[in-house]
Amino acid sequence: MKQTGFWHLAFSCWLLAVGCWLTASCVDTEESRDTPSGNFEALWRIMDEHYCFFDYKQEAYGLDWDAVREKYKVRVNDKMSETQLFEVCCDMLGELRDGHVNLSSSMDYGRYWAWQEGYSKNYSDTLERRYLGTDYRIASGLHYRILDDNIGYIRYASFTAPVGEGNLDDVLLYLAPCRGLIVDIRNNGGGELTTAERLAGRFVQERTLVGYMQHKTGAGHSDFSEMEPTYLDPSRNIRWHKKVCVLTNRSVYSAANSFAVMMHALPGVTLVGDHTGGGSGLPMSSLLPNGWSVRYSSCPMYDAQRRHTEFGIAPDVSVSLTDESTAQGIDDIIEAARKLLVE
């Protein structure tokens, strides 16, 4: 088959998953009653048939989805309130340790955020304002400037803010005289994968293997297609040819995690900072009989060495913010990147 980039493979997986979901959703609706026990069973079964990381997470930390069902089933009865059922269902989903798994109702939004909670932020809004100053430039979601040592600095806070080819041309043209470039994606929780791929395409000079993807082919935990390679193609517009440092922390997730994975596969790019948060499964959604919506990871994505990135990737250079430096207005991660770029 023709081998394409992340987004084109993701779209193909989406079409396949939609077909499977439509078939499964009809069966789920017919077999499940709109009662607390019926909704609980429907939720467990939807995840059992469609979630994509069971085998990996069983290996990683001993996840046993059948045992999880028995653990939480005893807390469910048909006289319980919606609030009580929602709590039990969210607790059960939390066993998956997946930030892409959410339960949505009109009263609440169930989520798993431990991929970033409990870790050092390694990012400071105050320090960002110090380095950007007040005269920085803005191109859609990009905030950028030239630092005083002639290093370019781009802050991209979220891939939900789209960036066009014209924006990227203007930014890279302005930063062209710089000796190196810092792309700061700390605290970027993701957004559009196409945006991440568009930006990464400005740093690749030839078609490069950056990862692999699979899609579900059946209801079994191990029912997947063969790994399909994903390539990053060079942009036809202005590209960056000098060294790049990408700054990461635990709050880099989903499409931002994918951007870090893509950039990590490129020569001349160094990841600096903290381990990313992860989130490498393409999300899909299904409905329970009571109308609640559950989102889950349906297609796993891997790095160029076929390794899972669901729990994030480590930086090339590990650096943390220190209280002493922060008190002095110094961002240790930015400063480490600046040193690497001038060596």
Image: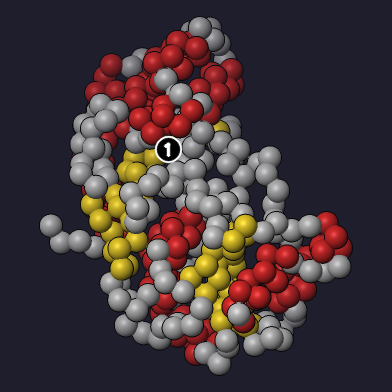
Where is residue 254 drawn, in percent x and y? Answer: 47, 51
Q: Name the side, left or right, on which 326 lies relative to 167.
A: right
Q: Quadrant of the N terminus?
A: bottom left
Residue, x 58% and y 41% (percent of image)? 115
In the image, farthest residue toward the bottom: 177
Residue, x 70% and y 71% (percent of image)? 335
| Residue toward you, 61 or 30 | 61
Quarter of the image holding residue 194?
A: bottom left
In the image, farthest residue toward the front: 343
Evaluate whether residue 289 shows in this view. no
Q: Is residue 36 above or below residue 50?
A: above
Label 1 crowd bin: few (<14), some (14–19), many (20+), radius 10 Å: some
Q: Is residue 290 above or below residue 276?
A: above
Q: Is residue 342 above or below residue 201?
A: below
Residue, x 44% and y 65% (percent of image)? 263
Evaluate whether residue 325 shows in this view. yes
Q: Quadrant of the C terminus?
A: bottom right
Where is residue 42 drawn, in percent x and y? Answer: 37, 21
Report the residue marked by disc 1. 295
| Residue toward you, 20 or 157 | 157
Where disc 1 sits, the SS reads strand
In the image, farthest residue toward the left: 1
Q: Is residue 117 above or below residue 169?
A: above
Three-letter amino acid code of the residue under disc 1: Arg
Q: Name the side, left or right, on which 92 lies relative to 280.
A: right
Where is residue 77 drawn, in percent x and y? Answer: 50, 7
Where is residue 307 drawn, in percent x and y? Answer: 38, 47
Residue, x 59% and y 67% (percent of image)? 184
